[in-house]
């Protein structure tokens, strides 16, 4: 395990945008100020049935990893990195995403682009852990240095996710078979329950359903579990929070277009005068109107989920109904980040299988997962990573 301090992102200003609000799209929820009810398990089954009727066959899945591997805990300016995060996160994603897809007869592969610190020992540790964690599923990887291009976090994200998608494209061209579905995810995505892919359409960009609970505030970014037994309502967050950025599902061409255009826009933006008059990227109005954000400056609206909201609108995804949130992918219920893996929301199978939406204000309590086996496994992963 190692610590290093990254450069603080350079603040950039932005013009005030006009936000378009849309309503219900198909069986899923579009991102707007008043979220409609989420689809039920029955509606998802009907969607899957319609796919079969139209002979839409999904037989291949690529997991494209992006960002900084091995994040244990810490804010963006100071990270604690360790092999155990790579191993445990990979283990959860393999069993929660890849194994179910393989059981359904899908072809799977993993591609990874990463930003790594310059310290040779840490670099080798994380690269070794990544190879060990994903094994033969890892078809290609690329590792670049943390440095000037990572000073600005949005550009760093765009470069990394585009790099991972490029690896998948090169592999698909060589194999002569493009991937039907791409799941682009950050390295520390930690899956609690299997992700249902049966009703995900490649022609839509699908993200997680962003719900909030009082337990989230206690540990986010700090790795603490002092919110155990904290109870409260699970609700869909308002649109002012932007778009969930843990993972993205969609067809190969769709994701290449969405994030390739973001990368081109960011690089073009950084090459120009960064005065207010010359900037083009917009941010959701609720973010800019927030008094705290006005006091702290526009850099607070530079967070990835705000930028993605504006970019998806600029591409017309929301207006055309091509942006969806997955109703069976709720933070702290179906997945979380590695740093918050010890705390989940107490949701029983009966509630998960209920016909109503999960994030409808119902009262749930946070609880600590049984940790003895988990800690023993982490100790084993740590030892494996150091060999």
Image (spheres, helix red, strand yellow):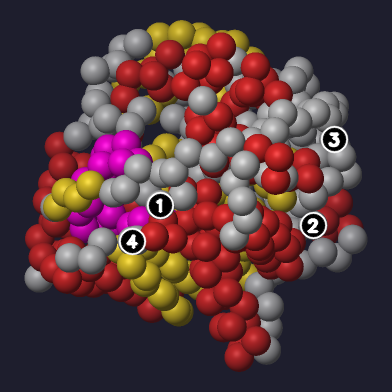
State the residue at coordinates (82%, 64%).
Answer: 56
Say which element carries label 2. loop
State the residue at coordinates (27%, 30%).
Answer: 222
Q: On residue 203, which mark appears?
A: 2
* Residue 367 placement (x, y as % from top left): 32, 21
- Label 3 environment density (alpha carbons within 10 Å; few <14, some 14–19, many ≥20): some
Give yes or no for residue 72 being in the magenta stretch: yes
Q: Nearer the viewer, mark 3 or mark 4?
A: 4
**Residue 94 position by quadrant:** bottom left
* Residue 241 placement (x, y as % from top left): 59, 26
Disc 3 target residue: 25
Is 172 rendered above or below residue 222? below
Say which quadrant the C terminus sits in: bottom left
Q: Nearer the viewer, mark 4 or mark 2?
A: 4
Disc 1 from disc 3: Cα separation: 37 Å
Residue 57 in the figure: left or right of residue 214: right
* Residue 358 placement (x, y as % from top left): 61, 23
Span colored in magenta: 66-88
Give yes or no for residue 61 being in the magenta stretch: no
Q: If you read the primary sequence from the N terminus, does the residue marked by circle 3 or circle 4 appear first?
A: 3
Disc 3 from disc 4: Cα separation: 40 Å
Q: If you read the primary sequence from the N terminus, does the residue marked by circle 1 or circle 3 appear first?
A: 3
Disc 4 target residue: 146
State the residue at coordinates (55%, 29%).
Answer: 298
Disc 2 from disc 3: Cα separation: 14 Å
State the residue at coordinates (57%, 65%).
Answer: 162
Q: How many numbered circles does the render carry? A: 4
Is 41 rendered above or below residue 188? above
Q: On residue 151, which mark appears?
A: 1
Is 185 rendered above or below residue 374? below
Disc 1 from disc 4: Cα separation: 8 Å
* Residue 48 placement (x, y as % from top left): 77, 50
């Amino acid at each position: 395990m190692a610590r290093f301090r990254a450069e603080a992102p350079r603040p950039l200003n932005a013009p005030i945008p006009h936000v378009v609000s849309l309503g219900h799209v198909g069986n899923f929820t579009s991102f707007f100020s008043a979220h409609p009810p989420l689809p039920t398990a029955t509606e998802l089954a009907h969607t899957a049935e319609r796919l079969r009727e139209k002979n839409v066959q999904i037989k291949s899945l690529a997991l494209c990893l992006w960002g900084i591997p091995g994040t244990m805990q810490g804010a963006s300016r100071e990270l604690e990195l360790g092999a155990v995060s790579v191993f445990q996160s990979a283990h959860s994603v393999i069993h929660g995403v890849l194994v179910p897809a393989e059981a359904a007869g899908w072809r799977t592969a993993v591609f990874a682009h990463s930003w790594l610190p310059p310290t040779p020992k840490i670099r080798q540790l994380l690269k070794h852990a990544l190879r060990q964690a994903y094994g033969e599923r890892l078809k290609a990887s690329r590792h670049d240095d943390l440095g000037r291009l990572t000073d600005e976090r949005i550009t760093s994200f765009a470069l990394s996710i585009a790099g991972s998608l490029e690896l998948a494209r090169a592999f698909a061209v060589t194999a002569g078979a493009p991937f039907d579905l791409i799941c682009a995810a950050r390295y520390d995505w930690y899956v609690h329950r299997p992700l249902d892919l049966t009703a995900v359409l490649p022609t839509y960009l699908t993200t997680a359903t962003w719900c909030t609970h009082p337990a989230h505030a206690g540990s986010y970014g700090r790795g603490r579990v002092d919110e155990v037994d904290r109870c409260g309502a699970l609700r869909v967050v308002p649109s002012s929070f932007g778009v969930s950025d843990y993972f993205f599902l969609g067809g190969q061409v769709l994701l290449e277009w969405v994030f390739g255009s973001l990368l081109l826009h960011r690089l073009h933006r950084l090459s120009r005068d960064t005065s207010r008059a010359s900037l083009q990227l917009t941010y959701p109005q609720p973010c800019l109107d927030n008094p705290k954000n006005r006091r702290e400056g526009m850099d607070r609206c530079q967070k990835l989920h705000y930028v993605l909201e504006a970019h998806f609108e600029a591409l017309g995804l929301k207006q055309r109904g091509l942006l969806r949130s997955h109703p069976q992918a709720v933070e702290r219920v179906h997945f979380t980040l590695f740093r918050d893996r010890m705390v989940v929301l107490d949701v029983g199978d009966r509630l998960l299988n209920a016909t109503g939406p999960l994030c409808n204000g119902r009262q749930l309590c946070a609880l600590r997962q049984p940790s003895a086996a988990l800690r023993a496994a982490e100790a084993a992963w740590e030892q494996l990573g150091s060999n």
